Amino acid sequence: MTVWQTIVNTFASEFSDLSDIENATRVTIRLILATVLGGILGWEREHQGKAAGIRTHMLVCLGAVLFVVAADRSGAMDDALSRVVQGVIAGVGFLCAGTIIKTDSQQDVRGLTTAAGIWFTAAIGVALGLGNETTAIVSTLLALLVLHVVPLVFPKSHEQEQ
């Protein structure tokens, strides 16, 4: 075998993780759905003037899917997938903590809904990564209801931030 043949074969094997059309389609659907569903929630938040908007939500959802799909595609067993999901939850929770701002006033805390929205977007990504597309879509619709309709029905009274 020549050096060039070895290089070409090595190159081809490095890109063989989605070698059959069924798996490539499945992973692509999950990644596209994550981008769309995260984008929908991000658009709603951006439309409300919040700092974490379309791109943030898209990337969080897409990242959560990628962590789960990559672990699953590498042959991770249930216990390893569970640890991946736990890591995503904890990591995104840490990111969310950075969106919460408390001022001098005991009552003035901002960013809680933004943090919860980012965390929830990661949960949608995990659901997609595990192959629960319908659950992810229904959850996204419910989140939109909570973020957009609930404030119309129950105007702010005690909450400081939406």
Image (cartoon, rainbow, N blue to C red):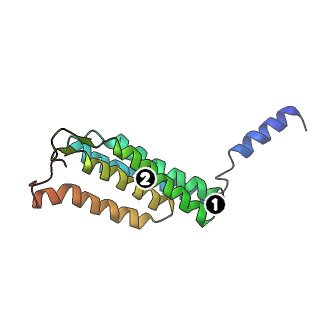
The residue lying at 44 percent from left, 64 percent from top is: 133
Quarter where residue 108 is shown: top left
Question: Furthest residue to the right?
Answer: 1
Q: In the picture, which quadrant includes the N terminus?
A: top right
Residue at image coords 10%, 61%: 153
Q: Which mark is residue 34?
A: 2
> 127 or 12: which is nearer to us?
127
* SS category of the residue bearing label 2: helix
Residue beneath the point at 50% across and 64% down: 131
Question: Residue 103's mark?
Answer: none
Side of 61 where 67 appears, left or right: right
Residue 118, given in percent of the width and then of the height, sits at 35, 49
Kind of residue sitting beneath label 2 = Ala
Q: Residues within 10 Å of mark 1 (few under 14, many from 20)?
A: some
- The residue located at (34%, 45%) in the rendering is 97
Would residue 32 be seen by someone viewing this image from the given angle?
no
Choose mark 2 or mark 1, whichever is in front: 1
Of 162 and 91, which appears nearest the observer?
Answer: 91
Instruction: Tell me if residue 66 can be seen.
Output: yes
Residue type at tag 1: Ala
Q: Position of residue 110 (x, y in %)?
A: 21, 44
In the image, is residue 79 above or below residue 16?
A: below
Q: Label 2 to label 1, Cα distance in Å?
A: 21 Å
Q: Are marks 2 and 1 in contact (CB under 8 Å)?
A: no
The residue that label 1 is drawn on is: 76
Residue 46 in which image quadrant:
top left
Mark 2 or mark 1: name the one nearer the start of the chain. 2
